[in-house]
Amino acid sequence: MTTAVADQYGRFETLNYWQRERLPELGVSPSARLVWFVLWGRANKDGEVRISYEQIAYETGWSRRHCMDCVKELITNEVIKIHRRGNSAKKANTYALQVVPRKKR
C-alpha cells in the first residue's frame, strides 16, 4: 500500500493506525476489520488485491455469505472499493484499498 502514511511510517505502524484508530472511527465491525486485514495482507504495492470470497472465507474460517457481508460493509464505509469486477468464469474481484476513507456524514 503506497500511501503517505505507509511511506512516512513503517508497515506495522500503518497497520496499527488502521486497526486501532481509523476503522473503529468509521464504525467498522470487528468481523469486517478481520476481512480488511486479510485484504491488506494480500495487497500489492499499489494497494490492489484480487481475491475471491472463497479465499477470504478460507483465511477467516467463516462462511462465504458472512465474508460477502463484511466486504459489503467495507465498501459501504468507503474503506475499499471494487476496482475490477470478477465474473462467473473463475475471475475474482479486484479491490482497491482506500488511502484515507472519507469520514461518515
Image (spheres, rainbow, N blue to C red):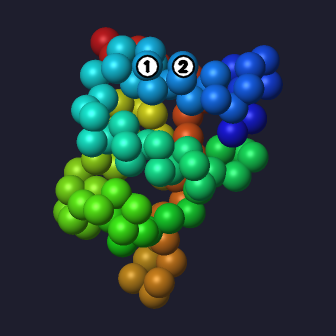
Say if 16 sits above or below 82 in the image: above
Task: Please state if 82 lies on the left or on the right of 105 as rendered.
Answer: right
Say if 71 sits above or below 52 in the image: above
Q: Which of 48 and 59 is in front in this view?
A: 59
Say if 44 sits above or below 23 in the image: below
> What is the quadrant of the C terminus in the image?
top left
**Residue type highlighted by circle 2:** Tyr
Marks 1 and 2, how far apart at CA:
6 Å
Residue 56, given in percent of the width and then of the height, sits at 39, 62
Q: Nearer the viewer, residue 82 or 23?
A: 23
Q: Tell whether label 2 touches label 1 (CB within 8 Å).
A: yes
The residue at the point 70 percent across, 52 percent down is: 44
* Image quadrant where residue 65 sits: bottom left
> What is the quadrant of the N terminus in the image?
top right
Q: Which of 70 and 94 is in front in this view?
A: 70
**Residue type highlighted by circle 1:** Arg
Residue 94, given in percent of the width and then of the height, sits at 54, 60
Q: Name the residue under label 1.
A: 20
Residue 36: in sight, yes or no? yes
Looking at the image, which residue sits at the far right? 7
Residue 74, given in percent of the width and then of the height, sits at 36, 39
Q: Mark 2 points at which residue?
A: 17
Mark 1 Cα-neighbour bin, 10 Å: few <14, some 14–19, many ≥20: few
* Secondary element at tag 1: helix
